[in-house]
Amino acid sequence: MSTTLAPNAIDTVFAELKAKGETALIPFMTMGDPDLETSVELVKAAEAAGAHMIELGVPYSDPLADGPVIQRASERALKNKISLTDCMAVASKARDKGVKMPFILFTYFNPALQLGLDRFFDLLKEHGFSGVIIPDLPLEEDSETRALAEANGIHLIPLVAPTSEARVERIAANAKGFVYCVSSLGVTGVRSTFHEGIDSFLSTVRRAASVPICVGFGIASREHAERFAGQCDGVIVGSAIVRQVEEALPLLSSAIPAEREQGIQAVQHFIADLKPRTTSS
């Protein structure tokens, strides 16, 4: 007997935003930086700032796609022995505090494999995740993971880069949730310029995909968000937010509640300022 799965919250949010002509703002945060309790508060602050969904990043010792800012955040979290299951639990704790936006887990494949893929997806479902991004899992090797994701009503969201070339159409055609379009060559990080063929690349992905497309890697300001708002359905901001957390660490790590709140507000204000004023296509 087949089980009917509830509509995925990611799809619902994108449909609502499309009807309003708005672009999704999708922050990324490294969980456990500086600690799990603060991560829960920062997730809540991101929603209050206007985020439409959020990527919860699992700290990893060999993050191939991540630049120095996120690497440092991972190192700080790993010193506190933050695990994959700890990061998943942040979603449930944030829900308990009233957060309603969809959660997306960002993790490399090895932690999921070590946990066991069946258990991994059981926990994603248990903690209310709507999507998962595994940047080092290629399309050619994702069949088992994809089947488990679909069986649990969770979108396996692919990354596609300008260097993907002939694979772009295959990756985009198989995408669920949205296609994560990498705006720049290399690792994540704040940039002043983007790949010179980015506009043509986004057009190619748009033609191939039946789901929304979002741009990430290097988006660091409202100007960047507005630069892409007319070409995509969402913008993903990672390193710029993680850097704000890093700069606020003295406050976020304070034993004085008022100082911790000041640090959280600083990150919240930064995220609020990222929201593009222009509409998507």
Image (cartoon, rainbow, N blue to C red):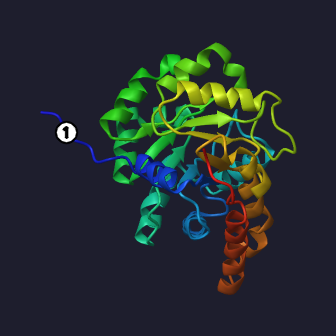
Compared with 93, 9 (above or below) is above
User: Label 1: how many residues lie within 10 Å, few (<14), some (14-19) or many (20+)?
Assistant: few
**On the picture, is 28 further left or further right than 93?**
right
**On the picture, is 138 further left or further right than 271?**
left
State the image quarter where residue 32 is shown. Answer: bottom right
Compared with 253, 139 (above or below) is above
Image location of residue 56, percent across then percent down: 56, 52
Compared with 197, 107 (above or below) is below
State the image quarter where residue 155 is shown. Answer: top left
Residue at the spot of label 1:
3
Q: Find the residue positioned furthest to the right.
A: 192
Compared with 258, 86 (above or below) is above
Q: Find the residue positioned furthest to the top.
A: 166
Q: Residue at x 82, y 37 (%)?
A: 194
Q: Residue at x 65, y 48 (%)?
A: 235
Q: Residue at x 67, y 17 (%)?
A: 165
**On the picture, is 146 further left or further right than 280?**
left
Image location of residue 144, percent across then percent down: 39, 24
| Quarter the C terminus occupies | top right
Q: Find the residue positioned furthest to the left.
A: 1
Image location of residue 120, percent across then percent down: 41, 40
Q: Amino acid at mark 1?
A: Thr
**On the picture, is 94 further left or further right than 219?**
left
